Image: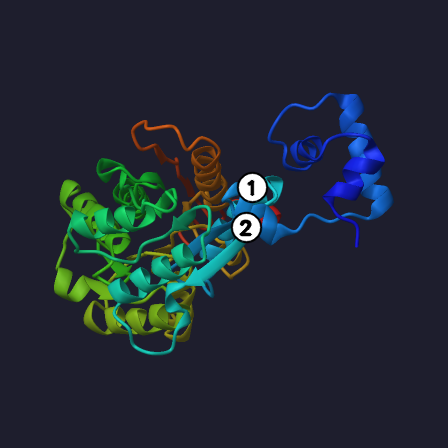
Amino acid sequence: MSGIKEVAALAGVSISTVSNVLNGTKYVSPELAERVEKAVKALNYEVNPIAASMKSRKSGVIGVITEDLCGVFYPYLVRGINEVAEEKGYRLMISDINGKKEKIPPVERELELFQRLLASRVDGIIFTSSISGVENKYFLELKRMAENKYKKTPIVSLERDLTMIGIDSVYFDGLVNAQTAVGHLADCGCRKICHISGPPGLQIAQERIAGYRKCLNDRGLELDEESMIAYGDYTHGSGYRCMEKLLDEVPDLDGVFCSNDQMAIGALRVLKERGKAVPEEVKLIGYDDVFVSSIVEPPLSTIHIQKNAAGRKAAEILFDRIGHPEKRELAVGIKLESRLVVRRSTVAGAEENWDLNDW
């Protein structure tokens, strides 16, 4: 098998020149670069990735931690991350917090995944934290772990704003988005609006509950949190169970805001089974705007979240940190805008709003 010495000899250049061409570490004239490339092709030379990573101290891999890879939301984020990673010649190492059958507390599971990725010497980590109700010292500990003396590994938070403690973040305004969703139901004439939330221990669920609560209070609408809020786990099955509970406890409800589209689809099934016309009797709105929301019957009104763009932006920030480790600037925080998508689950006769690009 040919080595770098043979490539240098055939191209008539030094070994360092071959290395600079292959790794892009220093400028090489177009003429010399072309000679090296021809020699590489002629000898069918392949760079040893392990040796290259040991020399450059870069693995060519970034870690990604998701909350639930089997859901219909997180694959969009991962696809956006992967698009940028491929452009940079990187691979992903994906870890899923819900991917282990044993009942491990989320804090322990998340820490375990961070430790594994750092032990694998990934060049950076993008993570969606499922942890709520913890002090900032938990995230400071994650940051400390990533900035050890052997390798300072940049990390980026997705969905949660952690810029105040020095962690780059790409996130959405869950409180405002929830207000928009509930406000739309109120504008459509709903007066008794219930909420199907995610687990109460998650920050993103807490933000959406806060937005729901604020909108009802601002508009002077009834709010009994014990009977009008049901807690699911972002699956369609939990949406189904929560909708059953709400109909049993609040039979005269006329609007439902679901914390994601999957739960809204489960809720829609119950409404159909119980003979509730949507949107004539009950208006239903989801959150995320995943592809299935536009093809159920009736199609779901929802809050469109820039999922793919969020993954891309997080990756762009991460690779900027990887490429410029000397930077010591403040943490970058990017809040992506969202928008209301109106379909026939809230407005009869609304125009079809299909987005086939996400399929």
Which residue shows up at 48% across the image and 33% down it?
323
Pointer 2 local density, CA inside 10 Å: few below 14, some 14–19, many at least 20: some
Image quadrant where one finds the C terminus: bottom right
Q: Position of residue 233 (x, y in %)?
A: 32, 67
Which residue shows up at 56% across the image and 41% down it?
84
For marks 1 and 2 on the same chain, the one whose residue lies earlier in the sequence: 2
Q: Position of residue 317 (x, y in %)?
A: 44, 35
The residue lying furthest to the right in this view is 42
Query: Quarter-wise, where is residue 171 in the image?
Result: top left
Which residue shows up at 23% across the image and 74% down it?
248
Foreground of the two, 218 or 159: 159
Q: Position of residue 161 (x, y in %)?
A: 28, 41
Disc 2, SS: helix
Circle 1: residue type: Val
Say left or right for 344 vs 358.
left
Say left or right for 309 vs 278.
right
Foreground of the two, 224 or 358: 358
Q: Position of residue 117 (x, y in %)?
A: 41, 57
Instruction: Residue 79: give its label.
Output: 2
Q: Which residue is mark 1?
A: 84
The answer to whether residue 174 is seen in the rendering is yes
Disc 1 from disc 2: Cα separation:
9 Å
Say left or right for 320 vs 295.
left
The residue lying furthest to the bottom in this view is 102
